[in-house]
């Protein structure tokens, strides 16, 4: 069943011999490079430090959400509640305890994310429900709670340093971007360098085979959803911190952007295949094109159409890669 | 003589199909090279070869599913070469796959008429499907021995053997001139063997050209008129069945003589404490199963499909719930509710269903080999890549796996996949290893390898329980063979003093003379 979707050859070797094969698989990276070249030629404003800083600020939150989505997609699941959870953790971080302390706000946001993630994971792993349905319910539930809590207007935290994390820079580079990249490196290590990560790939590729091999499938699934929840909750705080308030529409449609970024980055929705690097590149592709469309004064409605077209284009490109790799070389 | 045999046995006639200088290469691999072969109506042609010899590729080419890189495929009644599955189908080629093509959510009847459903859809897709049974369905099912299966049964409820027969029942309702059986009998057992044999006889009498791909000598010699032997993508020879022997064909298949497998004569050590004790076990269709496996002992459980033999193996090792009974390992009770728990207690299970639960499809050989013992290659959850790589390299050598540590396991032949899975289990150092059909769909050479590995394990004082549907395997591999019938263990044999005939009779029950 998974035969069709799994890539014929995966994982480049780090050695020199593997570089050619690695380079052949990097469609998303080439799309990104082409986009950067186009951006540089079509707008003088693109390669300015101010615009690039802005780009990083806008990308980091969705980037972290994409990392969470990546882990879940690796298990063969999908989480469409991430956007709502970003919203809920954001407004609760800003609103509970009157948003009087940044530390408390971070704790609240992470706790909200962890709770929802664990619940998702429990329903998927132990009750055997479809991830799509579980997180669809959670999407509506969490967003509903956001509107009920905020009554539709933004929640302003009391703490004056609430925006400090989002606005701080280190040597001119935004801290929020460093957090994103740090998390990306950590997740990449988790996926490739640990027993847990290997088990996540095994579960994603074949739950039956993983179970028969003594992999604790259910525990692995719950852990993945819980970890993803923590990251999404934290992303919710970062977004509120950047905006300076918990807004009820925060995180809207993040589920679509994160899923698209993960898939463009080369991960298989069927599970068991994908790399963190690809997910990061996928996020950047989205960010660059959105940024460029704004710089070129394209109307917001057309921007959505562009991004939709880009998703289709990127996904079509991945099918070329699969067929060229040749499933026919079996035997 | 060889050259002459590649053409018609009796003289000039129109061949049912012909391969003319056919070759197939994939990037970096030549799967087939320069094949010339003809087959005629009313003839049964066997294509033999070890796994990876290219026999399935050849069958797929005749069916139009793969296109030759060089040469062409001709089918009687068509002037143009076959270039697609639709071409082959319209020319009357019917291919039966190794894995039966059965839609689980359809009834048995709908599966019988699957081809018809798809073609009827093309002109009137809105047409309501007729309710109620077509009388021809009953006939088609009876013709393949599924006499006690109702047409309304959901196909999901059939076991692997009946599923294969269900797929074969389509030969009764689809017109064809060439019938290709691609290792169709790999998952059928001895009870269906007769049905397949009858079917092939009828097809031959009806003037169909039957081509079957196999590496099981018993069926090749029971059915075929001619035998085409392949090795490493080449047609080595075409022999008349009457003029040759299984030994000669096997020699051609592997290119050198292998020593015949001698029955095992390890000393049974009844005086030692048994490793595994099973008492009054009930699970699935198995009831009141009591058995013991001593250190260094290989115990066989032989039975027909549905006798409950797999239930025994699966329930002991946590793959299936146990309804009653006790399992003790070295005198200590083991109540394994999951494969993980069984593995921790020292019980490993080599599955019958290699594709589904034998290995992780996205994983390389190395990753599959270490999956069950990963923590041994890690410090606080962080993998030590070097240690893992070194161990995998050793295992690949020890188990003679073709392909390296980074080759995807699913691209290997069945025999090599099985070696990878065995390596995984032996790495977990179980006290008792339970093997469920260890050589299903595996060629002769790899089979000998696997037997060696099992014997070496027993020689280390571990226990092995082998569940099998092949009487010969039970006799060759085991110290003792238990017979399972209708969910119960009914008899016990020693290989030294029994024959396959004894085992089959005992498994079928007293009523067969």
Image (cartoon, helix red, strand yellow):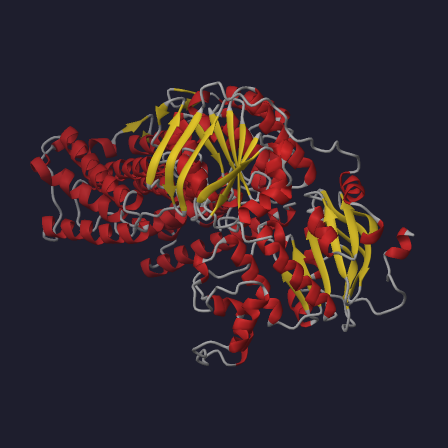
Closer-to-camera residue (A52/A209): A209
Which residue: 65% across, 73% down? B175
Quarter containing the C terminus of chain A: top right
Q: Whole-percent x and y of residue A306?
A: 41, 57
Query: Is B265 drawn above or below residue A94 in the view shown?
Result: above
Residue B513 in view in this figure: yes
User: On the image, which quarter does residue A168 sit in?
Assistant: top left
User: On the image, which quarter does residue B145 sit in?
Assistant: bottom right
Closer-to-camera residue (B474/A77): B474
Position of A282 with respect to B299 (left or right) is left
Query: Is B156 drawn above or below residue B434 in the view shown?
Result: below
Closer-to-camera residue (B460/B97): B460
Q: Whole-percent x and y of residue A204?
A: 42, 42
Residue A273 in view in this figure: no
Q: Whole-percent x and y of residue B381?
A: 38, 23
Which residue: 69% across, 43% down? B52
Residue reaching furthest to the left: A98
Q: Whole-percent x and y of residue A75?
A: 39, 42
Closer-to-camera residue (B188/B51): B188
Position of B227 with respect to A121 (left or right) is right
Which residue: 53% across, 72% down? B137
Which residue: 78% across, 41% down? B247
Across the whole image, how many numbered discs are drawn on residues? 0
């Amino acid at each position: 069943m998974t035969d069709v979707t799994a890539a014929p050859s995966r994982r480049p070797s780090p050695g020199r011999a593997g570089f050619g094969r690695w380079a052949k698989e990097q469609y998303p990276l080439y799309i990104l490079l082409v986009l950067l070249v186009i951006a540089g030629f079509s707008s003088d404003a693109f390669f300015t430090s101010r615009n690039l800083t802005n780009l990083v600020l806008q990308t980091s939150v969705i980037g972290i959400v994409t990392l969470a989505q990546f882990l879940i997609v690796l298990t063969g699941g999908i989480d469409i509640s991430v956007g709502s959870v970003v919203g809920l953790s954001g407004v609760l971080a800003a609103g509970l305890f009157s948003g009087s302390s940044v530390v408390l706000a971070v704790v609240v946001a992470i706790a909200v994310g962890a709770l929802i993630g664990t619940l998702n994971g429990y329903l998927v792993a132990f009750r055997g429900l479809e991830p799509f349905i579980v997180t669809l319910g959670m999407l509506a539930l969490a967003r509903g709670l956001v509107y009920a809590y905020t009554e539709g207007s933004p929640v302003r935290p009391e703490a004056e340093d609430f925006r400090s994390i989002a606005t701080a820079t280190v040597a001119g580079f935004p801290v929020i971007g460093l957090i994103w990249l740090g998390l990306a490196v950590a997740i990449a290590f988790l996926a490739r360098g640990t027993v847990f990560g290997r088990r996540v790939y095994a579960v994603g590729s074949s739950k039956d085979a993983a179970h028969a091999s003594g992999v604790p499938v259910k525990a692995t699934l719950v852990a993945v959803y819980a970890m993803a929840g923590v990251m999404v909750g934290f992303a919710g705080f970062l977004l509120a911190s950047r905006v300076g308030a918990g807004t009820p529409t925060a995180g809207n449609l993040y589920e679509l952007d994160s899923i698209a970024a993960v898939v463009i980055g080369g991960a298989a929705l069927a599970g068991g295949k994908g790399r963190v690097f690809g997910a990061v590149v996928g996020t950047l592709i989205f960010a660059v094109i959105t940024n460029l469309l704004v710089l070129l004064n394209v109307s917001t409605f057309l921007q959505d159409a562009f991004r939709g077209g880009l998703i289709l284009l990127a996904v079509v490109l991945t099918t070329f890669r699969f067929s060229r790799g040749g499933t026919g070389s079996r035997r | 003589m060889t050259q002459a045999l590649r053409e018609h046995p009796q003289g000039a006639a129109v061949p049912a199909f012909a391969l003319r200088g056919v070759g197939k290469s994939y990037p970096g691999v030549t799967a087939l090279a320069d094949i010339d072969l003809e087959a005629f109506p009313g003839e049964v042609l066997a294509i033999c070869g070890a796994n990876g010899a290219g026999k399935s590729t050849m069958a797929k080419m005749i069916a139009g599913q793969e296109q030759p890189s060089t040469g062409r495929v001709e089918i009687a009644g068509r002037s143009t070469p076959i270039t697609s599955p639709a071409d082959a189908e319209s020319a009357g080629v019917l291919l039966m796959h190794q894995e039966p093509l059965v839609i689980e959510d359809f009834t048995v009847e709908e599966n019988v008429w699957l081809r018809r459903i798809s073609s009827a859809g093309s002109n009137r897709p809105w047409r309501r499907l007729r309710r109620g049974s077509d009388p021809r369905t009953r006939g088609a099912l009876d013709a393949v021995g599924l006499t006690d299966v109702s047409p309304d049964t959901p196909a999901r409820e059939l076991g692997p053997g009946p599923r294969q027969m269900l797929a074969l029942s389509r030969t009764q309702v689809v017109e064809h001139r060439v019938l290709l059986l691609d290792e169709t009998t790999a998952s059928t057992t001895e009870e269906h063997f007769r049905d397949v044999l009858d079917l092939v006889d009828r097809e031959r009498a009806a003037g169909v050209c039957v081509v079957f791909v196999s590496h099981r000598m018993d069926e090749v010699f029971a059915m075929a008129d001619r035998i085409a032997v392949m090795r490493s993508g080449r047609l080595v020879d075409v022999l008349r069945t009457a003029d040759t022997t299984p030994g000669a064909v096997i020699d051609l298949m592997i290119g050198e003589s292998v020593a015949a497998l001698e029955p095992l004569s390890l000393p049974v050590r009844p005086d030692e404490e048994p490793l595994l004790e099973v008492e009054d076990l009930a699970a699935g269709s198995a009831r009141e199963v009591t058995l013991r496996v001593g250190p260094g002992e290989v115990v066989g459980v032989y039975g027909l499909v549905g006798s409950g033999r797999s239930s025994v193996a699966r329930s002991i090792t946590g793959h299936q719930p146990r309804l009653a009974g006790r399992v003790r390992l070295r005198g200590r009770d083991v109540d394994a509710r999951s494969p993980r728990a069984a593995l921790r207690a020292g019980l490993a299970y080599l599955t019958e269903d290699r594709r589904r639960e034998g290995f992780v499809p996205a994983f390389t050989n190395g990753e599959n080999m270490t999956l069950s013992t990963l923590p041994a290659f890690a410090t606080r959850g962080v993998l030590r890549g070097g240690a893992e790589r070194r161990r995998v390299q050793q295992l690949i050598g020890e188990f003679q796996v073709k392909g390296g540590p980074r080759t995807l396991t699913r691209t290997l032949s069945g025999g090599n996949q099985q070696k990878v899975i065995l390596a995984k289990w032996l790495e977990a150092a179980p006290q008792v290893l339970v093997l469920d059909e260890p050589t299903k769909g595996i060629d002769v050479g790899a089979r000998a390898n696997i037997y060696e590995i099992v014997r070496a394990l027993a020689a280390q004082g571990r226990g092995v329980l082998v569940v099998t549907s092949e009487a010969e395997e039970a006799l060759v591999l085991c110290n003792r063979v238990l017979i399972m019938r209708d969910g119960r263990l009914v008899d016990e044999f020693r290989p030294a003093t029994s024959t396959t005939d004894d085992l089959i009779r005992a498994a079928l029950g007293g009523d067969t003379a």
